[in-house]
Image (cartoon, rainbow, N blue to C red):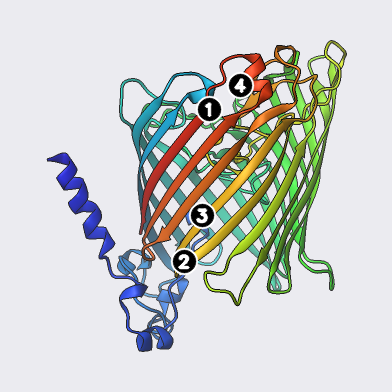
Amino acid sequence: MEMKKLILFLGFFIVLPNSHMFSQEEREQKKEPPLFMDDSGDEDYSYLKNEETASEYERMFAQGLKFIPLGTNKNAYLTLGGQYRPRFESTLNENYTEEDDTYYSQRLNLHANLHLGKSIRVFADLFHGLTSGEGDRTLEDDELAFHQAYIEFTIPDKQNRFLLTFGRKQLDYGAGRLVSRRDGPNMRRSFDLFKVDYLFNSNAIEVFYGKEVQPEFDVFDNDFALFDSGSSDPSFWGIYTDFKVGKILGKTELYYLGFHSDFSSFSDLSGEETRHSIGIRRYGTLGKRMIFNTELVYQFGELGEATISAFNFEFDYKYVLIHTPWKPTFGLKFDYSSGDRDRGDDKLQTYSPLFVNPALYSLAAVNTPVNLNGLHPNFKIYPFKDFSIYMDYAFFFRSLREDGLYTPPRFQIRTADSGSSAYIGSAFGLKILYEINRNIEFEWRSTYFIAGDFVKESGESNNIFYTGPTLEFKF
């Protein structure tokens, strides 16, 4: 009976009003409404304030919730929205063992964006996470939590803007290789912070200080820790810039990121950690066919009594056959994260990914970029509009044999002396994405990881299979 209700529920949303239901003539005459953003707080529906500009756009589902005026002049208004994401996940031979893990999970999210004139904005984002089975899963189960809750002040400066933000907010910088919102689990990552942005000529400079929020399981028990000197939550601060230089193709990001944790563990060293990361990222397009992303990071600091000197670099290039049916895209990515050279000394060369999105290194998040390098040839096609198939095959190696194997976020699961080979294994990844309409998206991810020599030498070495169909509804 419950399954029938679920099928009817999903079927109802699939036939929601959407851009696909308009005739070709109507689509040519009207603009499509804005797409949903990864951060709902960045969505802008101010065009609905004026009936004339609103009529230029196709009407969207639940449009009445996107601009709720709070006065006759409409300078103050409220935007409401949300998300429902059911998912089925199954992992066979988790962490190379004979243990399997299969469960259902769902995320329910409701948010409110309050605009008080042009200068003040208040945003709140409630998350609820639930999984099947007994017990609570870290990052998956949480009865109710404020994922985001912040106030933002805008100070205009001629054609530019200063933004002052205080509260709980998610951060997502660059390609997510150092700072990401962690969208895989039910509970995204956020920070209790203070942030200043300066936006000018399509460029941005951001300065921030915050502490990572540690998700708990009950109602509103994720304490605000920014001013709690006794909190063990990791501290995080930095400067992040995104700008375009003259006639140079693409854009450039330069950044400094600081990190402090009361306890960290890498290789044979552990203790209090203060780590600084400086990096540069170049990304963009070359003509209509080539897409590129390159990034170089250097880290320094202290872990206990040891000094840190580590690095990471990535090259990611894609070529699109724009005039070929299905628009096939060929890609090649190489990533290198340094490892520790000498066990037992007072120096640490192991790179830390901080708050990485582990799906960048395999769709099932098997590996994390610590003492890791990998080559990722990949391929993507669009058999029809709004439907894509992505495939990759990755080869993974330990960067140095004197360091071990790590799993997300940065836990060592095999020590360096448990095997002599550098080869960790290879993985085939498949992602199918179908954007059914503006509100509904279906995604299916699968990964088959084949254990390599080091895994076989160091313990259990069963091949890992992961699959995870996901349905996402946004409004």
Q: What residue did someone put label 1 on?
A: 463
Is residue 142 shown above or below 193? Answer: above
* Residue at x 61%, y 30% (from the top left corner): 227
- Left/right placement of residue 280 relative to residue 154 reads right
Q: Which mark is residue 38?
A: 3
- Please tell me how crowded label 4 is: few (under 14), some (14-19), or many (20+) other residues with Cα within 10 Å: some
Examine the image and state in which quarter residue 437 appears: bottom left
Question: Between 33 and 24, which is closer to the camera in this rendering?
Answer: 24
* Residue at x 34%, y 71% (from the top left corner): 60
Type of amino acid at the residue the image marks with label 4: Ser
Q: Tell me the quarter of the image containing the N terminus.
A: top left
Question: Between 329 and 442, which is closer to the camera in this rendering?
Answer: 329
Q: CA distance from mark 1 to mark 3?
A: 33 Å
* Residue 169 visible in the displayed image: no
Instruction: Give percent across and percent down for residue 28.
Output: 42, 87
For marks 4 and 2, the one nearer the N-term is 4
Q: CA distance from mark 1 to mark 2?
A: 31 Å
- Please tell me how crowded label 3 is: few (under 14), some (14-19), or many (20+) other residues with Cα within 10 Å: few
Closer to the camera: disc 1 or disc 4?
A: 1
Q: Secondary structure at mark 3?
A: loop
Label total for image:
4
Closer to the camera: disc 2 or disc 3?
A: 2
Q: CA distance from mark 2 to mark 3?
A: 25 Å
